[in-house]
Amino acid sequence: MNDSTISGDSPTGPPKPTAKKKRNLPGMPDPDAEVVALSPKTLMATNRFVCEICSKGFQRDQNLQLHRRGHNLPWKLRQRSSKEVKKRVYVCPEEGCVHHEPSRALGDLTGIKKHFCRKHGEKKWKCDKCSKKYAVRSDWKAHSKICGTKEYKCDCGTLFSRRDSFITHRAFCDALAEESAKSKAENPNSNEGKDVEATPPPTPPPTTVVPSVFPLQNPEILESTTRLLEDATPPSLTNSTQPSCSSSTNGSSSSNVFASLFASSTSSGTIHSRTNGFANLFHSGNDRSAPPSSEPISLCLSSTFGTAGQERRQYAPAPPQPAAAVMSATALLQKAAQMGPAASNASLLRGLGLVSSSSLNLNSNGPREWSGGGPHLEPDSLGLGLACDGGSAGLKELMLRTPSVFGPKHTTLDLLGLGMAAAAAGGGSGGGLSALMTMPPFGGGGGEYGGEDMQ
Amino acid sequence: MKAELRANPPTITLVQNPNLFTTPSAAAATQSRSVSGAALSGCCLSNLDGACIEKLLLHCASALERNDVTLAQQIMWVLNNVASSAGDPNQRLTSYFLKALVSKASRLCPTTTFNSAAAVGGARRLMSVTELAGYVDLIPWHRFGFCASNSAILEAIRGFPKVHILDFSITHCMQWPTLIDAVAKRAAEDGGGPPLLSLRISVLSWRPNVPPFLNASIEEVGQRLTNFANYRDVPFQFDVVHHHEVTGQDSNLLLGQLNPSTLKLRNDEALVVNCQNWLRYLPDDEDDDHEEDDIRRSIPSSYGRDSFLETIRNLNPCLVTIVDEDCDLGGSNRSLASRITTCFNYMLIPFDALETFLPKNSARRLDYEEDIGRKIENVVGFEGARRIERQESSGNLWRRMAMKNGFTSVPFGEDTVKEVRVLLSEHASGWGMKKDEEMMILTWKGHNYVYATAWAPLDRAIT
């Protein structure tokens, strides 16, 4: 009554391509046959018969003999003497299996081998399309050919490889509602034998639609920005003063606070960053005022590990690089952005009342209004201490190496300055991070940070 | 095992200093600049494995608790260099933990303009019903519980002409189509016993404020379920149990209202109570340790798990199914450190599982992980009653049910075990199943993930 929509219906799922034909109960051997019980190892062995010349292995002696002919070696094929034919049957080595019983042995070696793999072996062949797994390679190949064609299909057009998923979808799909309504109109008493018209999918597939406007106070920005950046969606926010890099607007707008977070306890400085968002931000600042004195060294210290491409990007108008680069920082700090993006020295930690010694670099370029009604941002409130004169060479290397290390995440160099600052503030002479990294939980007493916590 | 889960094939091999995190380095802080620089240059962030990340997280949390902002910042910076919500499972997980720590940091001081109320329940992604249907099947996290429970329910209601299922769950009835389907199939088979005359499912109008969020009302979901049941010729009724004046966190009021009349129980119906990922959102019952938790004290009478279970038992159900995450995060006194450790190792499971079959930039994967991220934020970022993710281990549940609340375990049948095995065989090979005492446990690479249990009141009166 319900199966009109299920193609390839079978009780447990899509039909197995092999060995599912209706047939007599397998394994009712000739009582005279010789019963062969092989160990799992022997059964699975692919090279029981090895050629002494080329070491090629064969499963059957017959095949080896045929092969030997090629080497001009003596060979001997068993002759089929009609009298001598002793039929052989094979039992499954798995105790408790029905085919372990000689009375249910299978007639050929390949059959018992496949049975053993399917029922008692590891399913190591996985279909790329539906993740269904098979123990026997030929099963997998056969499935791969038909995968997607004989699966469960909802009237809305969606395909399912698993019955559970199909049933659940079916129950809630608009296609069913429409169909039921129609069938009720036609024939209130019957659900069967009707023509089912395909209906368009009731809802678009899961999408990552994001609002085109990002009010920074909106908590949704956390999620939406992440997805936006992930998908490298075309920019929905543009700033007329920054045509070169509009796609990173989100990143930069949030980085403001992020930067403040980390920069709060540092001396004044300039952020130098190689990510789009931050670079862009930096640019935008320069549009209106002379660039703050910068220490190129901090940018170019790129290390042996950074890629040249990334370095070059620093001051160039950033190409629309996949925004995954800024994502992590962005996603993280959107949260922080909620607390006070408009404040020119909006330091998260300052806001927390936890920071005392911050002197942010406030170049007061005047508020910049982002389209979309976002809050005013002052790029230069990013003031980050690039306290690299502390000699924390290790830090630089560490930071600069990052980009090449993390595949899709090109860089988190927005934190370059931050890290520097942190180190400078914490350790003074580059010892800050080192101390951090080598600190008690990982070892013994760690200087000023103490070792009292969480061993 | 940890190593297996966290295997992070480095794409670029860099000099690694294996001593960095293991050697007692009292001298490190006093080492000369060049030495520390060398130590750092030997440290490759990509090689920060899960154990190191976990330590950094613990460090950061500890620094926050001690108000050591500078240190916390530094660790966050390091973590941020590791974290990427588009990277490998460890990096992704780290990014959500980092987010949770930043959120915690921003909440530590009440004088800010930071609106912490927005941190939880604020951002929500609404799914359509069919999207949700796909969501629950991405990994067997939900389906395992559905499958085990439905199979046990089907067995328990055999022979009863009328059945009433009281559903406490967070997945908006995604469990029920397959049950309706199974009921229909059994009715079509010979020897299915007396036909089911009525199947009724009741759900509360209240649910914890956790993902997944649906863009449709529960009534609409019920309408579709009814429609589907009609289509399958299953006599079906859907009820919503409404509450009076229940808002926000005050599930107490609602749950306190549960009784045979509000639930519209009928004597001729066999009652089944289904709890999927539900118990953990109920607070612990008031116990001796009076915490300094203001929020909790402001709730008049805490309606906790034991009260809930007692209420349930008094309804005299023929079966109670309980499915939840097998992870010990409960207890209001669990320290932040132990929560981070437990949560980090536990939550790696879904991240690792998703990695096996979805590309790194898959939108479905990102959405799924984001929802897990919310959980992490709740576990790490909040204390007291606002920490609503209070998973308890399967062992704890067993003690709670059997020792404290007068339930006896109902073993899962062979068919159920078989069904679950078939289900798992259709997912990634890392998924497995353990039968532990009388419960079934979904495992990932041998680690417990979700348990499914079935219970009946010890003194169930046969009516």
Image (cartoon, coloured by chain):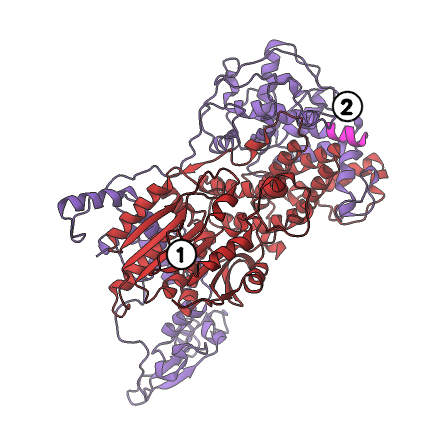
Q: Quadrant of the C terminus of chain B?
A: bottom left
Mark 1 or mark 2, earlier in chain = 1
Identity of the residue drawn at 51% across and 27% down: A218
x%, y% of residue A220? 50, 30
Q: Colour of chain B?
A: red
Which amino acid type corresponds to the residue marked 1 in the rendered image?
Lys
Task: Please state the horizontal and vertical placement of residue A18, each as a whole percent of the image.
Answer: 32, 65
Task: Answer with the quarter of the image where residue B91 lies.
Answer: top right
Neighbourhood count class around disc 2 (C-alpha, 10 Å): few under 14, some 14–19, many 20 upward = few
Please determine whether, in this image, residue B420 is positioned above or below residue B237.
below
Q: Estimate the x, y position of residue A315 in percent, counting from the top left.
A: 60, 20
**Residue A421, numbered circle:** none
Instruction: Tell which residue pokes out farthest to the left in this image.
Output: A186
The residue that appears at 41% across and 65% down in the rendered structure is B416
- Residue A205 part of the magenta segment: no
In this rendering, the answer to whether B366 lies above or below B415 is: above
Question: In this figure, which residue is indicated by the disc labeled 2?
Answer: A357
Mark yes or no: residue A162 visible: no
In this rendered view, identify the residue nearer to me: B11 or B56. Answer: B56
Q: Residue at x 67, y 19 (%)?
A: A345
Kind of element beneath mark 1: loop
What's the amino acid at mark 2?
Ser
The chain letter corresponding to purple is A
Question: Residue under mark 2: which chain is it in?
Answer: A
Residue B280, horizontal then vertical, whole percent: 54, 50
Chain part drawn in magenta: A421-429
On residue A132, which mark appears? Answer: 1
